[in-house]
Amino acid sequence: MRQQSRVAFILLLTPLVLWLGLLIVIPHIDMLLISLRERISFGVYEGSLTQYEKALTEPLYLRTFWRTAVMSVLATAITLLIAFPVSYYIAKMAKGRLQQVLFMLCLIPFYVSELVRTFGWMILLRETGLISNLLQLTGLADQPVELLYTDATMMVGLVYTSMLFMVVPLVTTLESLDDSVVEAGYDLGGNGLSVMREIIIPHAMPGIVSGCIVVFMLSLGNYLTPTMLGGKDSLWFTEMIYNQFIVRSNWELGAAFGFMLLVLSSVIVWGMLRLTGRTLKETMG
Amino acid sequence: MIPSIPQSRAFRVIYGGYVLLFFIYMALPLTVVAVFAFNDSQFPSLPWEGFTWKWFFGEERPRIGVFHERGILRAVGNSAFVAACVAILSVSVGTTNAFLFNRYEFRGKGLLYVLMLLPLVIPGIVLGISILVFSSTLANGIWDLARVDIQALRPGLLLVILGQFSFITTIATLVISARLQKFDRTLEEAALNLGANRLTAVRTITFPFLGPAMIGALVVAFLMSFENFNTTLMLVGSDAPLTIAMFDRLKEGSTPLLNAVSLLLMVASSLLALLVILFQRRP
């Protein structure tokens, strides 16, 4: 029996180790090694920190890096602000059928490819698009208005794309809040604001943290939305990675960029977990 | 701020209005995509030129429909193939992972569990390039050693499958683990007492219990793979899956053909999603 259990253990461990080893751990180590070398001539490489030096001294690279980080944080904050009242409504105000239907309405758009969602925004916002036509029709504009290719448009797209990943954890945590606790808050003399601050938000914290982490990751790693909706000078860091790898075939610099993005996302995720005293296992698992 | 606490009428109206606005925001882009699939014009924009089915069934240029457009059909085929492989692979490994984490205590379990979660917090593009880099290191190494060029390790469908598998497996593992945790192990022990061996007990008792979660994970994995963009973008070769093919066309300028493809995608994936939700609602 013990022998049998040992065999079963090894059989179950093997796929996990192969998967994590060959597709996650080793590729990332390899990427790190490639980012730490420099091409001397054809097929000859030398270890050096040149790529990181380039990435950290070239103003365009550095600016894009920070811009991507700041815009992703901003997108996360806006998503949270928009999603919270809606999630609260679904979890606490709506009852029965309505609650189920509203929740489904939130879920379904996200089974549709991100490409389709972005395409929808392009149809709405471009110069010949619906909103531009509507503005002309109502007399608010006297010529076609180009609404695409600005930071604000990109933000609309980013928030839209990751909304679900904020709403679902928020609804789940808010649903578990007992109505009587809220009532007790009012009975003890609290008003709407203090009940919100002292009871509802602390209770929803786990949902807020996991929602924010996922939305931040999705915004940071987004490629489609900034490319299709963002302007010429709203370059996103993922676009630079793509350019180095596919357009310029400069894998060394591209790998360095990839590693910087990885470090940035890890630091921010770690920071958020640290700040709220939670572990990755509790938040994601 | 719950229904049992009285609120002013103005507050309720404003709150309700806000929620309504939110759902309009959610529905707007998808509705627009769907509606313009039926516009009898070269461009998916106003003016409205009349209703047509041509973008679905049209047989000749310039109004060639989805069902006669070879490039798109081939891309759908590629996507379906990739998604089926990814779904089967990730659910298989997800199941073994779930059993491992649920049934065994071993040194390094905590570390492995965190490693297992990591793919969720690695940006898709970074996952893609790391696999691209590693597979080409492998291919170059094999070439240097044996002068054999292994095409499978160059960008193409195999790498796309591996790239998507690398993070979808985490999701499959989580879905199946959640169900396995609810399993009452005494049922399995009862089977053992009644003379079944361990494998038979797992096969006849545990698997039927896990069934709904496995089917749910299968569909979710299929959908996630089908709509994946970031990881695929870095690993794609000459055979493009649907999202990449549509992206390439979108860059060149769009026709309502893309709306028609999108509408079909929406209908198909909502149906699948609905199916899963209904299926898992059953106790």
Image: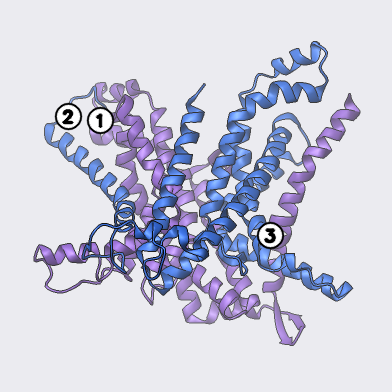
Chain colours: A purple, B blue
Relative to B154, is A11 above or below?
above
Q: Position of residue B82 (x, y in %)?
A: 62, 54
Image-based side of A109 in relation to A20, left or right? left
Q: Nearer the viewer, residue B275 or B53?
A: B53
Residue ID for mark 1: B1
Looking at the rendered image, the disc whose residue lies closer to the viewer, 2 or 3, is 3
Please report the residue visible at 51 percent of the width from the left and 29 percent of the height from the top. B280
Q: CA distance from mark 2 to mark 3?
A: 58 Å
Give the class, few, some or many, for how many residues have Cα within 10 Å of label 1's Cα (few <14, many ≥20): many
Q: Quadrant of residue B218?
A: top right
Q: Are marks 2 and 1 in contact (CB under 8 Å)?
A: yes
Residue ID for mark 3: B158
In this view, which residue lies farthest toward the bottom? A41
Q: Position of residue A3 (x, y in %)?
A: 91, 29
Q: Nearer the viewer, residue A266 or B135?
A: B135
In this view, which residue lies farthest toward the top? B194
Q: Secondary structure at mark 2?
A: loop
> Quick check: can you spot residue B119?
no
Residue ID for mark 2: B7
Give the class, few, some or many, for how many residues have Cα within 10 Å of label 2's Cα (few <14, many ≥20): few
Q: Earlier in the sequence, mark 2 or mark 3?
A: 2
Please report the residue visible at 65 percent of the width from the left and 76 percent of the height from the top. A252
- Circle 1 chain: B
Does mark 1 fall on the same chain as mark 3?
A: yes
The amino acid at mark 2 is Gln
- Circle 3 chain: B
Q: Quadrant of residue A179?
A: top left
The amino acid at mark 3 is Leu
Q: Position of residue A93 (x, y in %)?
A: 28, 30
Q: Secondary structure at mark 3?
A: helix
